[in-house]
Image (cartoon, grey):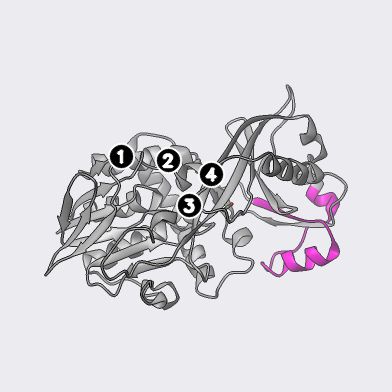
């Protein structure tokens, strides 16, 4: 079976790897460089408790299942690529700044809330303006840039073909075949998977069945501490931002901006992120901004993932991961690769690509 995948992000690469393991002949078409869009921009939290506060009932179990798959997924990627990807299950603190917020955070878990003093004992950088915190020892993180590079390596070592700087602009539907047309040629395949993140709805088709995903920009900062200052020992969420210790830096994310495909960095975002972080951890005011970047999350109108076969036979989609592309990666890889290989896979109706009907 020949499969063409459009998009070499964390989803396309990991599904491609699983398809190779299942014996398929796989070509990934990437419009730029592999894992350099949302995957590269992601802060890499594997945070089913922190990220599913307002989740759909089908999304929470999917997030939990994926988080449970992560340790083995990470170990296999490291083993097969020979590279470290920084998977760490150090837990996360979800900080409340008022009693009201503390009640909301407490409802996410059956764990007991820490008092403000207990939270500061766990994370001494926290300031005085906090009411308590939820501590979840299961939350994890991975270095998404190292993950992207390692997954690319794993896919290619598994015999997958990757064509970079080759954007699929159109999908052809033939009699028993599908084609992905690029500026160079039409790649004919038995099955096509669109895993192009925020670009997934932008590929032309005569009868367009691709989901109407839109980009939601997130800007992120990385701070370096002054000499002698320690990084937090775990991920900290609070005041509308998250703080992720990684390789000597502290990542602060992220904005949620609906500005189309514009990824320009703004002073307003930089100020918003630093103000929020400093009011949570006052000493961060003395840290230095080392990097500022932006990425585009793929969001479906209902905010849910879009996974599975479209109404065109053999045309599949894996997009709409929104804020959870890294968290969902192992479960997306397992589910979508099994569907494409014609194996049993748990069907999640709420995630069906067929729920949107056809584009006008
Ligand atoms: N998962 C974090 C974000 O999308 O900003």
Residue under pointer 3: 326
**Mark found first going from the N terminus, 1 or 3:** 1
Q: Which residues are magenta?
A: 92-119
Q: CA distance from mark 3 to mark 2?
A: 13 Å
Q: Is mark 3 within 8 Å of ligand 1?
A: yes
Query: Mark 1, residues whose alpha carbon is within 10 Å: few (<14), some, or many (≥20)?
Result: few
Q: Is residue 104 magenta?
A: yes
Residue under pointer 4: 263
Q: Is residue 310 left or right of residue 64?
A: left
**Residue 165, label in figure:** 1
**Mark found first going from the N terminus, 4 or 3:** 4
Q: CA distance from mark 2 to mark 4?
A: 13 Å
SS at mark 4 in the image: loop
Q: Please name whichever residue, 226 or 64, is drawn nearer the observer in this view of the structure.
A: 226
**Mark found first going from the N terminus, 3 or 2:** 2
Query: Mark 3, residues whose alpha carbon is within 10 Å: few (<14), some, or many (≥20)?
Result: many
Q: Quadrant of the C terminus?
A: bottom left
Estimate the x, y position of residue 233 in percent, counting from the top left: 67, 40
**Mark found first going from the N terminus, 2 or 1:** 2
Q: Residue furthest left?
A: 175
Q: Nearer the viewer, mark 2 or mark 1?
A: 1
Reply above or below: 332 against 17. below
**Mark found first going from the N terminus, 2 or 4:** 2
Q: Is residue 130 magenta?
A: no
**Mark found first going from the N terminus, 1 or 4:** 1
Q: CA distance from mark 4 to mark 3?
A: 20 Å
Q: Nearer the viewer, mark 1 or mark 3?
A: 1
**Residue 299, label in figure:** none
Reply above or below: 357 against 295. below
């Amino acid at each position: 079976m020949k499969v063409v995948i459009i998009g070499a992000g964390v989803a396309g690469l990991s599904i491609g790897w699983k398809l190779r393991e299942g014996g398929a002949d796989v070509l990934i078409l990437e419009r730029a460089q592999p894992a350099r869009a949302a995957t590269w921009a992601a802060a890499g939290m594997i945070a089913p408790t922190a990220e599913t506060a307002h989740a759909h009932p089908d999304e929470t179990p999917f997030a939990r299942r994926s988080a449970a798959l992560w340790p083995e997924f990470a170990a296999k990627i490291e083993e097969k690529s020979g590279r470290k990807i920084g998977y760490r299950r150090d837990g996360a603190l979800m900080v409340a700044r008022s009693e009201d917020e503390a009640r909301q955070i407490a409802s996410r878990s059956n764990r007991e809330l820490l008092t403000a003093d207990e939270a500061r004992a766990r994370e001494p950088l926290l300031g005085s303006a906090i009411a308590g915190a939820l501590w979840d020892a299961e939350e994890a993180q991975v270095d998404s840039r190292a993950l992207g590079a390692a997954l690319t390596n794993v896919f290619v070592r598994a015999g997958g073909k990757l064509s970079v700087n080759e954007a699929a602009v159109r999908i052809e539907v033939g009699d028993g075949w599908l084609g992905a047309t690029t500026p160079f040629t039409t790649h004919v395949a038995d099955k096509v998977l669109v895993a192009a993140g925020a670009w997934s709805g932008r590929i032309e088709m005569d009868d367009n069945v691709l989901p109407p995903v839109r980009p939601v920009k997130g800007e992120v900062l990385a701070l370096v501490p002054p000499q002698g200052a320690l990084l937090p020992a775990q991920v900290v969420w609070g005041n509308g931002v998250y703080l992720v210790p990684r390789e000597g830096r502290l990542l602060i994310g992220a904005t949620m901006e609906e500005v189309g495909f514009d990824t320009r960095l703004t002073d307003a975002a930089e100020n918003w992120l630093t103000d929020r972080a400093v009011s949570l951890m006052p000493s961060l005011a003395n840290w230095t901004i080392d990097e500022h970047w932006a990425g585009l999350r793929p969001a479906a109108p209902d905010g849910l993932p879009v996974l599975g076969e479209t109404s065109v036979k053999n045309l599949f989609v894996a997009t709409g991961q929104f804020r959870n592309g890294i968290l969902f990666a192992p479960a997306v890889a397992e589910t979508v690769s099994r569907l494409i290989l014609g194996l049993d896979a748990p069907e999640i109706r709420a995630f069906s690509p067929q729920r949107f009907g056809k584009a006008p």
